[in-house]
Amino acid sequence: MKFNINNVRLGLTVGSESQFPRDPRPEIALSGRSNVGKSSLINTLLGRKSLARVSSSPGKTITINYYDVDGKLYIVDLPGYGYAKRSQGSKRSWSTLTENFFVKNPSHDALRLVIQLIDVRTGPTDDDIMMINMMIDNAIPFKVVATKCDKLSKTALATRINELQHEYFEGTDIEILPFSSVSRDGREELWRIIEAAAV
Ligand SMILES: Nc1nc2c(ncn2[C@@H]2O[C@H](COP(=O)(O)OP(=O)(O)OP(=O)(O)O)[C@@H](O)[C@H]2O)c(=O)[nH]1
Ligand SMILES: [Mg+2]
């Protein structure tokens, strides 16, 4: 499916499970720890500077934001996890809402793909690995994308991606896609993946 990305807007902001959309429109969700670059990736994909809010104070908003792409697709910005300074209560509401997105969501069948972000330099955290295992266990299709690749030189990047691939995903069909919201590297390939998934 192709999309006119001049026709995008924030469609829905969901703060509790009763607000999940019920329409069958395909959804692509962004998952990853706080500050990994989910909102920046959405802005890069959609060619907007500040459609999705890039956090100056990470981990504050605990809502799930649905970006309406051309009336045909939702790109879903999930709240980031693993933000250490968050209060206990706010950590709990993170996990309840996000868990419900995956398990109690009336439009569960609309979820076509989760884009799981990892920081290219840090590599996957324990929480990232937990997310990936949850998606494998529940047969949720996902793609691992390494962000902030502009922070490494070209050769260091190739080495690092190889290293991560071998250390974490050896013997699986999981393939890491390098991405940068600064250089926009990986944008075209990610669009192809989204277009193929959003059928
Ligand atoms: N150099 C570089 N910085 C990036 C990149 N992507 C995001 N950042 C920076 O990383 C910080 C966090 O980016 P966000 O897009 O807000 O991260 P997020 O995952 O949406 O964070 P939460 O909303 O808190 O979950 C910001 O300062 C961004 O400018 C990237 O590809 N390269
Ligand atoms: Mg964000």
Image: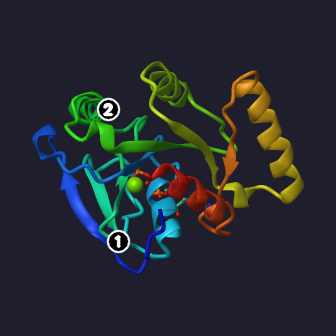
Badge 2: few (under 14), some or many (20 or more) residues near its Cα, within 10 Å?
Answer: some
Compared across the picture, whether 165 is left or right of 138 comes to right
The quadrant holding residue 187 is bottom right
Which numbered tag is attached to residue 102? 2
Q: Which residue is mark 1?
A: 70
> In percent of the image, x 37 and y 65: which residue is there?
52
What type is the residue that disc 1 sits on?
Asp
Compared across the picture, whether 17 is left or right of 94 comes to left
Badge 1: few (under 14), some or many (20 or more) residues near its Cα, within 10 Å?
Answer: some
Q: Secondary structure at mark 1?
A: loop
> In percent of the image, x 43 and y 76: which residue is there?
4
Query: In the figure, 129 relative to 194: above or below?
Result: above
The quadrant holding residue 55 is bottom left
> In percent of the image, x 44 and y 59: which residue is there?
39
Report the mark closest to the observer, 2 or 1.
Answer: 1
**Mark pair 2, 1: CA separation:** 24 Å
